[in-house]
Image: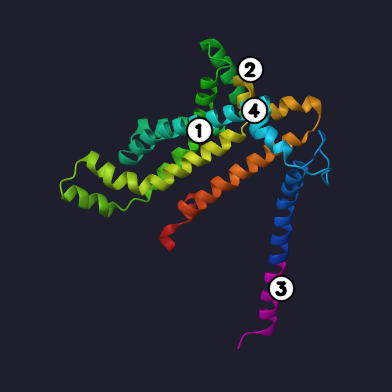
Amino acid sequence: MADPQVAEGRVMLRALGAIFMSLAALVVALPILIVCSAALNGGRTMFFPPQDPTLARFGEFFVSEPVWTRALTNSVIVAVGAATLSVLLAWPIAYRLWKTGSRASTMLATLGSIPFAVPPIVFGVGLGFFWAFLGGLGTIWAGIISHAVLFLALPLVTISIGLQAIDRAHLDAAATMGATESVTFRTIVMPQTLPYTVSGFFFALVLSFNEFIVMFFVSASSFATVTLQIFNSLRNGYTPTMAVAAVAFIAVSIAVFSAVARWGDLPRLMGADQSRN
């Protein structure tokens, strides 16, 4: 029979855990609720609770206000382009590292991960000088390449995790049946690593969509993404349209990470040891 004091202690720990998690959820959710409510203000000033609630500011952000629609378009172009390019760059590096483990592939993987570890302002200043020297400062393609290099580490890690998860028995069976390397890649490697590739793409996309510091230096005020436009709009004070932009960031992040949790191998991506299952 269980010791009553031990059972009581477990109940108390569960209760304290539930209280802590509830408080943590409240701390996370409260600012989001305030921002979402502020986006409903009918005037040009951000109030909470909102005054004269309306959805007009959402229409301005997504449809009718050129400065915001251009910024949103630029953000989408940069985010999608950077995420696609980062995946295309990460795949051959991760594949050669997994296939051969050579010193050259290890060095490339290390170099690809450095920009993500460097303080963004240092990386941004360096890119500013770099693109100014090449004549690309202030161009949107420079922003795409800059973000692709900055977030290369994300698909590099997720694809490497996916490659490590491949069952070697499948590769041995393919080799026994006479499959060439290209056939094995197409029929075994690609299908099994697709969720990890998509996860890396979406991780890079979300962070590119929300990134400000590097884009501030690379854009040189020639174009604006949503994050830059929020900064530029601060001279006019805090407006409800800025809150709409924040809602857009939140919505994109929730949608992407929900998709990764639903279709990706989230436990392995978060570092769980699958060998214990």
* Percent coordinates x, y for residue 110 in the rendering: 45, 33
Spatial CA distance of label 3 from label 1 is 48 Å
Q: Quadrant of residue 76?
A: top right
Q: Position of residue 156 (x, y in %)?
A: 44, 38
Kindly identify which residue carries mark 1.
Answer: 80
- Look at the image and tell me whether residue 225 can be seen: no
Crowding around mark 2 (Cα neighbors within 10 Å: few <14, some 14 to 19, many 20+) is: some
Q: Nearer the viewer, residue 4 or 116?
A: 116
Dot label at residue 220? 2
Res. 75 in view: yes
Verify CB contact (< 8 Å) between mark 3 and mark 1. Answer: no
Predominant SS of the magenta segment: helix
Front position among marks 4 and 1:
1
* Residue at the spot 63% in from the left edge and 29% down from the top edge: 69
Measured as percent of width and height from the top left, residue 179 is found at 18, 45
In the image: residue 48, left or right of residue 115:
right
According to the picture, the residue beneath numbered tag 4 turns out to be 213
Q: Which quadrant would residue 93 be assigned to in this image?
A: top left
In the rendering, which numbered label is found on residue 12?
A: 3
